[in-house]
Amino acid sequence: MEYAILFLHYSGDKMISSLKKQKNEDNKRNLVQVFGLPRSGTNFIEWTLNNNFYGINYINLYQKCNTKGLSEYRKHVALKHSYPTLDYSDYAIVIFKEYKNWVDSIKRGSSRGKSRGSAPLKTYDEYLKRAQSLDQGRTLIVQFTQSYNNYGYLITQISDLVKIAPVVDFKQPQHRLNRGGADSSETGEIFTL
């Protein structure tokens, strides 16, 4: 399997980025890997890990998407949209939206207003079925709206799963996150639940 890593480095006073594809042979792993269908809240969880926990150091991993029914299927995209697995991490967090909310989000599309394509129920059901089949002692399955509305409890659940204490004054994102995955930052747009 292949994945890509975005490298940022300085040359003089300019930051330069380069995207490098690498084989998964060097076993790049996260302590915890985030999974979820597109538009389900994965950036929200990734932002939470990197901004509220010391030592997790979550990074974006890439591979060909194996989730049948998605427009991303067989394309080289973020691992987080493939079927959930523990092959890339010690722990997994799977986030989902209720089906109707997910369909609405897919139709609403990206921040550019472009629809993400269809949202087949069969794909949704299979994704959650695979998530539920993972080792429950190493997997946390969370619903986006509940996680957003009960953020302190989400922080506790993550801490209990990975055995790492959160920062003392954790913060919750208040705005929609851009498409950066592990490098997401808040935009000016308010979250739509």
Image (cartoon, rainbow, N blue to C red):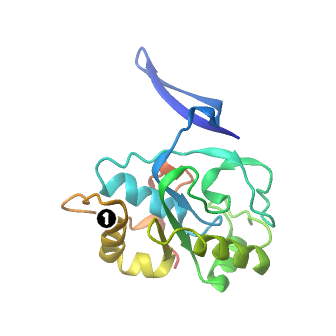
Residue 93 in the image: x percent, y percent?
49, 65
What is the crowding at mark 1: few (fewer than 14 residues within 10 Å), some, or many (at least 20)? Answer: some
Q: Is residue 140 left or right of residue 121?
A: left
Residue 116 in the image: x percent, y percent?
74, 64
Q: Nearer the viewer, residue 156 or 148?
A: 156
Q: Residue at coordinates 38% horizontally, 64% vertically from top-left?
A: 173
Residue 166 in the image: x percent, y percent?
26, 60
Residue 189 in the image: x percent, y percent?
49, 65
Q: Is residue 187 visible?
A: no
Q: Is residue 149 left or right of residue 176?
A: left
Q: Is residue 31 visible?
A: yes
Locate the N terminus by quadrant.
top right
Q: Is residue 154 above or below residue 13?
A: below
Q: Residue at coordinates 29% horizontally, 63% vertically from top-left?
A: 171
Q: Is residue 69 left or right of residue 21?
A: right
User: For residue 162, which quarter of the picture?
Assistant: bottom left
Q: Residue furthest left?
A: 168
> What residue is pinned by disc 1?
159
Q: Is residue 15 above or below residue 140?
A: above
Q: Is residue 104 left or right of residue 31?
A: right
**Tag 1 secondary structure:** helix
- Number of marks in the rendered image: 1
Q: Residue at coordinates 30% horizontally, 74% vertically from top-left?
A: 152
Amino acid at pointer 1: Ser
